[in-house]
Amino acid sequence: MIVLFTDFGLAGPYTGQLLAVLQRDAPSVPAVSLFADAPAGMPKPCAYLLAAYAEWFPAGTVFLAVVDPGVGGSRRALIVEAGGRRYVGPDNGLFELVLRPAADPRSWEITWQPPALSASFHGRDLFAPVAARLAAGAACAALATPVEPIREPGWPDDLAEIVYADHYGNALTGLRGGSVPPAAHLVAGNRTMAPAQTFSAVAEGQAFWYVNSNGLVEIAVNRGRADRELGLAIGSPVVVSR
Amino acid sequence: MIVLFTDFGLAGPYTGQLLAVLQRDAPSVPAVSLFADAPAGMPKPCAYLLAAYAEWFPAGTVFLAVVDPGVGGSRRALIVEAGGRRYVGPDNGLFELVLRPAADPRSWEITWQPPALSASFHGRDLFAPVAARLAAGAACAALATPVEPIREPGWPDDLAEIVYADHYGNALTGLRGGSVPPAAHLVAGNRTMAPAQTFSAVAEGQAFWYVNSNGLVEIAVNRGRADRELGLAIGSPVVVSR
Amino acid sequence: MIVLFTDFGLAGPYTGQLLAVLQRDAPSVPAVSLFADAPAGMPKPCAYLLAAYAEWFPAGTVFLAVVDPGVGGSRRALIVEAGGRRYVGPDNGLFELVLRPAADPRSWEITWQPPALSASFHGRDLFAPVAARLAAGAACAALATPVEPIREPGWPDDLAEIVYADHYGNALTGLRGGSVPPAAHLVAGNRTMAPAQTFSAVAEGQAFWYVNSNGLVEIAVNRGRADRELGLAIGSPVVVSR
């Protein structure tokens, strides 16, 4: 399976063009869009989201991961193999958190060249064809050459910031559940929150935190939108009060 | 075919994870998202929407219908068979309007257990695997045990409220076309509206009502957004003035 | 492949119903949504978008192109063949810019009749079944009769207006790159912009223009939203200052 992780949006022309390329180049491989609204142009929060959500997918999955504010500049184009999964996308830190915990990660710089490469849409012209070829069975070595990717040692293992707000207004942090004591309080948007197991365990309008279904600490308001009511956005700090 | 009816949103991670599960567990069954923006956390308006839109699909269709504010609490997980179609989702009234008119409806409580069940995403962990198994040929009795679902006798057959606002700002009611006299006026958002057959039959900026392509009474403004211009939201009352 | 170009939105019920029809009537043909948020009810800007984006797809592609404010009225339903691609949709100017440059364009009025035709959703009831039949191998002559479509000779070859704002807030014009001198400045939203090759070539917050990956002149702000910051919307004029 090919999984899309991008900031391209679903409705406009970009995801459709990616899917058309994947269909053309790997017609028998199913493709699913996981995120089309990853934090736009922000590789750092995206790196935490990608690592948390990729883990749910089985070994062998190919991720087409494109959050690429430097497109058209000098940043390299990568294939990364980590934890049995492969990732195709830009060399801008996006893969830091999948690389870091992996036992034997490997990285390649893409050398395969498309017949035509636009300056602004490498997702369609470069990354999607490479992801399709990998998913259809091509070897990394046939498309790319080993490289040492940019690493971000200064980025923490767990990021105490909001990294995504979902369709319901729930605010996901870059903190994995295991990094926060189960009874800790969180402070975000000037509000202090206790943990709760489920929405129905707290009163209507109350903010709380829990470990979401992909292992990240998430802030929600029962029957409300945490993002608006607490004034949270990508990058808003979260403090763990033990 | 498996049809998704949820309040999960399309762009974020939830619908993609559902589709990945369906692909994994029923790879040869096509899956289509019908609604990913059903009224969030509101089983009542969703029940009217689901009933109206399900009817268009052929017998044999499996609906993965997840609007589930009580996820993680004690609400039961259901399979419902009604009108030749099957529905998988929470026991919270969501299936009231498909059950009510059905000749011989049947319901089961899901007993199948996934290897891992998160507290907050039964759509992915429980309902999608069950829908996939049903669509791939499993019998209800192999996954579930007969049960009497929660019924909502107080909900009317036709709901005189807004149940959805679409991409154009058209406001759908829970009234079926046959329940409203063809020449009746509607009052909603302090505006009185006559019926019209098509958008082009009324002046620009004029509000009108019609029976939409799925049989529900819908309020629109020619070349405008009825939701904003009339101040309509989910739950806004509609009065039929005969 | 069948490519969807509509103003229906993705999340609501319309695109899902189109995809269900295509799956039913042409199960072996992949379908991809290119635009579900084309300018709502505005065939003119859509005509420029469609022409620019269709060109990227190979010959043989069938476009299901539905931007149809006159649905239910007297406008005709068309099949158009131009540049080796076929288009199915309403006769309201939407195909003007694919017809104009084509060597030997042909048009047909659809005569095929569905078992049931709603007044407001010809996309589902008429256009999608016809697109599916074409993609599955039916001849145009079996579904339609030759016709002279409405032409719009007053529409320019290149439209100096905003025709779309994407997920990032970049504003696309109806100007093809070749129609604007490479060093020209553009004036839009009271701002004068120089061209740049990539986002990273300009300072943060700076507006610039470039030729996008589908050949249209596009206005962007590095790390910002051009639509909001420059006050641009569909129809906003753009002046080329040579």
Image (cartoon, coloured by chain):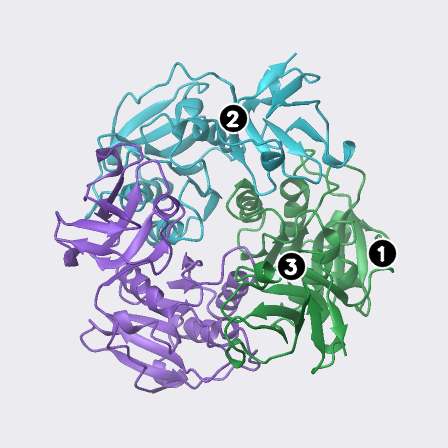
Chain colours: A green, B purple, C cyan
Q: Is residue A194 left or right of residue B67?
A: right
Q: Is residue A54 visible?
A: no
**Residue A66 coordinates in the image, percent (x, y):** 67, 49
Residue at the spot x=42%, y=58% of the render? B33
Q: Is residue C39 left or right of residue C68?
A: right
The type of residue carrying mark 2 is: Ser
Q: Which residue is mark 2?
A: C236
The front one of A165 and C156 is: A165
Q: Please identify the quadrant where the N terminus of chain A is shown.
A: bottom right
Crowding around mark 2 (Cα neighbors within 10 Å: few <14, some 14 to 19, many 20+) is: some
The front one of C231 and C139 is: C231
Secondary structure at badge 3 equals loop
Residue C168 image label: none
Specify the subunit that label 1 lies on: A
Crowding around mark 3 (Cα neighbors within 10 Å: few <14, some 14 to 19, many 20+) is: many
Crowding around mark 1 (Cα neighbors within 10 Å: few <14, some 14 to 19, many 20+) is: some
Do marks 2 and 3 share a chain? no
Q: CA distance from mark 1 to mark 2?
A: 43 Å
Is disc 3 in contact with disc 1, using a CB cutoff of under 8 Å? Answer: no
**Residue A143 coordinates in the image, percent (x, y):** 74, 48
Q: Is residue A111 left or right of residue A40?
A: right
Q: CA distance from mark 2 to mark 3?
A: 33 Å
Q: Is residue C136 visible?
A: yes
Q: Which residue is mark 1?
A: A151
Specify the subunit that label 2 lies on: C
Is disc 2 in contact with disc 3, using a CB cutoff of under 8 Å? Answer: no
Compared to C93, does C38 lie above or below? Answer: below
Q: Which residue is mark 3?
A: A232
